[in-house]
Image (spheres, rainbow, N blue to C red):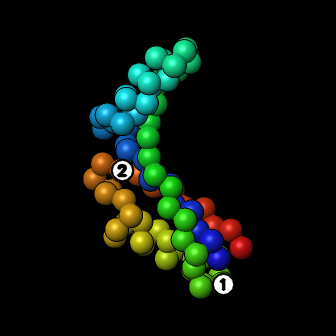
Amino acid sequence: MKATVTVMLKNGVLDPQGKAIAHALGTLGFSGVADVRAGKVIELDLAETDPVKARAAAEEMARKLLANTVIESFRVAVEE
């Protein structure tokens, strides 16, 4: 199974990378961008065949390693 973990900074946490991207977009002529939040996407190829167990495993991986849950939130999507 393939699990995709998307990690983003929580609302209220400063995002300097997002600010830099927003500024660069403005200098390139892309107007109307109010805010940018940058995150990361991690794709996991899991041997697990049960989608419920695969999701649980990916969520545990995210909590323990992939996301700093103090300042980041995450979501998990599983594909068969």
Instruction: Identify whether 8 is placed above or below 1.
Output: above
Q: Position of residue 24 (x, y in %)?
A: 44, 24
Closer to the camera, 27 or 22?
Answer: 27
Q: How many marks?
A: 2
Please tell me which residue is depicted at 37% across the width and 43% down the height of the picture: 10
The 10 Å Cα crowd at callout 1, few under 14, some 14 to 19, many 20 or more, is: few
Which amino acid type corresponds to the residue marked 2 in the rendered image? Glu
Instruction: Identify whether 44 is placed above or below 11.
Output: below
Which amino acid type corresponds to the residue marked 1 in the rendered image? Thr
Please tell me which residue is depicted at 46% across the width and 17% down the height of the picture: 27
Q: Position of residue 6 (x, y in %)?
A: 50, 55
Horizontal side of 37 relative to 52 (left or right) equals left
**Res. 60 mark:** none
What residue does disc 2 label? 72
Which quadrant of the view contains residue 61?
A: bottom left
Residue at disc 2, secondary structure: strand
- Split into 4 quadrants, where in the image is the N terminus? bottom right
Q: Position of residue 25 (x, y in %)?
A: 49, 23
What residue does disc 1 label? 49
Q: Position of residue 16 (x, y in %)?
A: 31, 34
Which quadrant of the view contains residue 54?
A: bottom right
Callouts 2 and 1 close, C-beta under 8 Å: no
Please tell me which residue is depicted at 36% across the width and 36% down the height of the picture: 17
The 10 Å Cα crowd at callout 2, few under 14, some 14 to 19, many 20 or more, is: some
- Real-space Cα separation, disc 2 to disc 1, in angstroms: 28 Å
Horizontal side of 11 relative to 51 (left or right) equals left
Lower sequence index among marks 2 and 1: 1
Instruction: Identify whether 47 is placed above or below 26.
Output: below
